[in-house]
Image (cartoon, coloured by chain):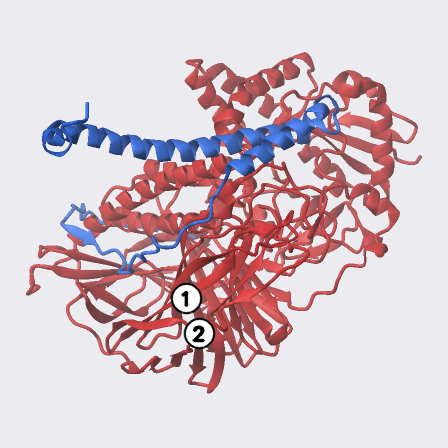
Chain colours: A blue, B red
Amino acid sequence: MKIDIDRMDFAPSSCNAEILEDDSVNEDFSSYKYCPSVTEEDLRSEKLRAENMKGGLDNPMTARTALEAQLSAILTQNRIDEIETKNLGYKLNEARVQRRVFDYIKEYEAPEIE
Amino acid sequence: MKTKYKAHIISHTHWDREWYLNSKYTTEWLVPFFNNLFTMLEKESDYIFVLDGQMSMIEDFFEELNKSGVSSNIYRQQIRECVKQKRLFIGPYYLQPDWQLLSEESLVRNMLIGNQIASDLGGSMNVGWMMDNFGQISQTAQIHKEFGMKGLYVWRGVEMDPEDVQSEFLWESPDGTTIPSIYLLDSYRNVMRLAEYEDIMEKRVYAEVVKLKPFTTTRNILLMNGYDQEMVPDDIQPFIKNRQMDTDDLTVFQSSPERFMEAVMEEKPSLKTLKGSLYSGRFIAVFPGVMSARMYLKLQNDDQQKALEKRTEPLSTLVWALGGEYDGQLITEAWKTLLKNHPHDSICGVSIDDVHTDMEERTRYVNQLSSSQILQKLKELTGLINTSDMKDEEVNVVFNTAFYKRGEVVTFEDETFFVNLPPMGYKVIEKSSKPDSDLVLDGYRVENSLIILSINPNGSFNIEYKNSGRVFENLGVIEDRADTGDEYNYSYPDFDSTITTSCTKAEISISKKSSIRVVFRIKIEMELPESDADNHTERSKVLRKLPIVTYLTLDADSPVVKCRTVVRNTVKDHIMRVLFPSDIKTDYSYAGSPFDITERPIHIEDYDESSIPEDVRKVIVGAREAKPNTIFLNREFVDLNDGAEGLAVLSKGLPEYQVVEKENIIALTLFRSVGWVAKDINSRIGDAGPMISTPGAQCLREMSFEYAVYPHEGDVYSGNVCRESDIFNSPVISLITDRHEGVLDKEESFFNFSSTLNSFKVTSCKRSEDSRSVIIRGFNSSETRIDVNLESFFRIERACFTNLLEREKEELTVEGNNISFEVKAKKLLL
């Protein structure tokens, strides 16, 4: 339905207003560990599947599944790399902080470290 | 003389923008694709091609050109010319959406934006093009008719008597609108790549004609010359021009969707009528598992649809009507971004992980746009309210963007208020109003004027509906089973073990307590198999704890018990549902769907495979579901009733339900965890997509689900189930402002609809596309004609019905600031 209204000319101007978020509480589930999303074993299995199907690449009836397996192996590798990047990045950040703090505490805490 | 059969070859490409690759790769392909297409159109002056019914292909192509610093002007001109010459068919959609999982307005916007872009490039095709979406909604005919479509092409979901299959039919919406429809019974690719195998091209064409002849209602036969992401248009003209492939009783030529439709209808065939939703996987799979694959995407999408439809646009419209700005460009940008998540391979959750990561990124962007607009428009509206005489520095205001007057409990700084809110308006809250009765709390039992809610030691709950005295027991039990399916279909392992919370000991506490609101917190730990095992044949013996916390809220005077369940999904390969035993004696369920309430039988007879004749078997070539579907769509609610009373489960963005025949249990799916795009599974015949690992589809994350239980009198219509679900899905907005001068009173309703039967639902309130008027869209959910009155705060100069392109149809009588009109049963109000 299309309604032609007589627009008003109140020219709204902004005021102070704060929207209240819903008051639901965030649960602390940190003690519940996830099972691994993707493992080295998954990667090995996908690489093996891709390898085993390579022979079908020239056959129009099997090339599609062979390529799917190759793509799946790459994406699984990417996922593992992502997890590894995340873990390594976190460790690297901590190591950088430790290295810097040692400039200040080395003489008290571990003067023997070179 | 006997008229010849006419083989219409339609050349096309079906473009999955994202599926086994994300769009950053596939859009690159559009440059060579369009170059190939233009080369073909230049080489063959009679060549005709269909661009998959979706305008995003062209938009993405222009974007790719832009990235390379190439002007798109010459291509625009070329496209416009070919469209006008009826050699290139574009539109009517922006993208190929899934039709089940989206809101009413998302579907409308998809076609509206698609049509606008197509108009700039010469005009949209005048038929619907539903090549591959996974099942059809009941109002498809009415929606397409209101976009000026003359017909439809459709594949998945159609079922006919195997002894009487026809490749054309009339599709009827619940309001009686019909549209001629072409059933692609042997898919959209039956003569793909003809010219590439030119030696056998003729044989293939003739063989396909022979296969399809038994099913055609006219002497026109449809041959579909294309497939997914076809990069090179098939060079068929050299083999068919000058009628060189014709025989004594067959003429073969390149055609178009419009021409084929016209040719069929010119013969005035006697067509059978199929009514309502089409959701059979008997001849071609509809993949019901897509309704629960990657549920987090459905929830995020639901949030953003509502942010745009129920907040951004209505609030912007009010500000505009009061004299302010309407940021149409930003709103369109938000819509277009959200619509990019709506293709069937995207919102259905059936792609690789990277695709769905992109989708989450898009949703976040839409959220940024909508959140900033909502806050801005609320500030502008609130700035007009006179709060100067309030006694406190901080002033509490509640906005209600639903078109219903409602009583709500709201919280400001730990203080709860009961407020009666005007429809599509606001109220400054000074003190709590008095509900009909306060809550009475006794241990883990609480009652209001309508309901008694009590919590069981296992965390399930009972609801007594006071009007009838009926008690619904053991609601909210969680059920967990193995899912050895894939993103497309749930599947069962050879040996399953179902685990429920029936025998668990729940941790129950009272989280909030006042005379108008009580919230129970229920914590359960499930010990679940870590994954499937032994080559997907059973569940693992290794168990892992999975926490579930449910908050149950009962408010004063509220007819519903609201539930919010939060889980950390720690395990893989399973499906989790929440169960609501109704014990209501009925043979039908009633569920919300876009622009409708759909009735479905609860008991569904098994297929008799042997009844499919050989000629039909030859043409049903794709994957199929081995058993009839019993899992269905619910948009915002599912209801079981016996006419006198009923039990409805309302939900926010949880589209999948099943009714378990024993005790007529409503099972609402919370999520499924699977690890593959597609693979061999027990519940499907044939493949659905690529066998690619998708650890992201295991949904190892925290998720929050909202649903509600609504016992009621009467049936789904007289029980106002649609209205209660709409209210549940339209939360109010509470905000704090300061004291300031203003021109508006402390309470105002801007638009107030009243209708007989309370069955009128508004699905959109926005500024019109021509920027001159207010558009309100909705539908009559009931099976009877209703009278509707709209009262407006603004002076109405003129009002009219439109079609979905917002073109005027029928002028309405305006009396003061009121418009009264009738809406026929199941009719869209446009």
**Is label 1 in a helix, a strand or a loop?**
strand
The structure residue drawn at horizontal position 32% and vertical position 55%, both measured from the top left corner, is B796
The structure residue drawn at horizontal position 44% and vertical position 13%, both measured from the top left corner, is B70
Q: Chain of mark 2?
A: B
- Relative side of B787 to B319, left or right: right
Q: Is A61 or B636 nearer to us in this picture?
A: A61
Provide residue B268's location: percent of width, then percent of height.
77, 46
For the N terminus of chain B, which image quadrant? top right
**Which numbered marker is on residue B126?**
none
Q: Please determine if labels 1 and 2 lie on a single subunit.
A: yes
Residue B118 can be seen, yes or no: no
Q: CA distance from mark 1 to mark 2?
A: 8 Å
Provide residue B480's location: percent of width, then percent of height.
53, 61
Residue B754 can be seen, yes or no: yes
Q: Which residue is mark 2?
A: B458
Three-letter amino acid code of the residue under disc 1: Ile
Q: Chain of mark 1?
A: B
Q: Is residue A113 above or below residue B455?
A: above
Q: Earlier in the sequence, mark 1 or mark 2?
A: 2
Q: Is residue B116 above or below residue B574?
A: above
Q: Which residue is mark 1?
A: B524
**Is label 2 in a helix, a strand or a loop?**
loop
Three-letter amino acid code of the residue under disc 2: Asn
Q: Residues within 10 Å of mark 2 (few under 14, many from 20)?
A: many
- Relative side of A85 to B515, left or right: right
Q: Is residue B465 above or below residue B808?
A: below
